[in-house]
Image (cartoon, rainbow, N blue to C red):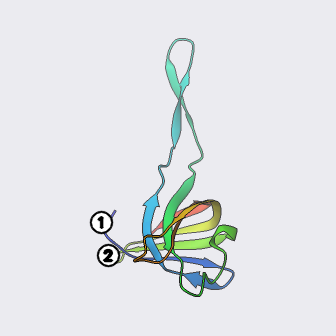
């Protein structure tokens, strides 16, 4: 995976928001250990795609409620042209806002996605 992110965008109901300052991809688990009588086995797990972002609230407010996103699309574009697209994006939680007097209000959002494709 490339080192630098060029752009992140969230599309929902025909509107797009791009004022994100941080992006973090969640860990994905593909199998879990299962205790058996004579050995340890494993079982496959359906991977859960998710990510966390920090958004800066624009002066006029968000173009849509970022916590109300259901079935949205989130795209991460990396330096060099690589792109990751999350489909079926739903907001799980909204963290507390932070403001320091020099920058606009920043808020953290946690999202889960039905699909993830890397190009």
Distance (Cα) linking label 2 and label 1: 7 Å
- Tell me if I can see residue 119 in this picture: no
Residue at 60%, 81% (x, y): give it. Answer: 62
Residue 99: x %, y % from top left: 47, 70
For residue 3, side relative to residue 7 (left or right): left
Residue 79 position in % (x across, y down): 32, 75
- Judged from this view, the residue extending furthest toward the bottom is 60
Q: Tell me the quadrant of the picture where the C terminus can be found.
A: bottom left
- Does 60 sit above or below residue 19? below
Question: Residue 3 versus residue 35: which sits nearer the camera?
Answer: 3
Q: Contact, CB < 8 Å: mark 2 with mark 1?
A: yes
**Quick one: SS at disc 1?**
loop
Q: Is residue 52 above or below residue 4?
A: above
- Does 47 sit above or below residue 9? above
Q: Residue at x 65, y 64 (%)?
A: 90
**Image quarter (top left, top right, bottom left or bottom right) of the N terminus:** bottom left
Q: Is residue 61 left or right of residue 102?
A: right
Spot occupied by residue 9 in the image (x, y as percentages of width and height): 51, 77
Q: In this figure, which residue is indicated by the disc labeled 2? A: 79
Q: Earlier in the sequence, mark 2 or mark 1?
A: 1
Taking the spot 48% from the left edge, 67% from the top edge, the residue there is 54
Residue tagged 1 = 3
Residue 16, image quadrant:
bottom right
Q: Examine the rendering and report whether any part of residue 98 can be seen.
A: yes
Q: Which mark is residue 103?
A: none
């Amino acid at each position: 995976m490339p080192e630098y992110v060029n752009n992140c965008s969230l599309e929902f109901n025909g509107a797009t928001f791009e004022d994100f300052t941080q992006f973090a991809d969640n860990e994905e688990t593909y199998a879990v250990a299962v205790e058996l009588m004579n050995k340890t086995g494993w079982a496959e797990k359906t991977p859960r795609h998710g990510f966390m972002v920090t958004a800066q609230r624009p002066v006029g407010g968000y173009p849509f409620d970022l916590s109300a996103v259901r079935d949205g699309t989130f795209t991460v574009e990396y330096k060099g042209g690589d792109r990751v697209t999350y489909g079926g994006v739903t907001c799980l939680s909204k963290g507390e806002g932070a403001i320091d007097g020099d920058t606009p209000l920043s808020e953290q959002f946690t999202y889960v996605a039905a699909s993830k494709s890397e190009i």
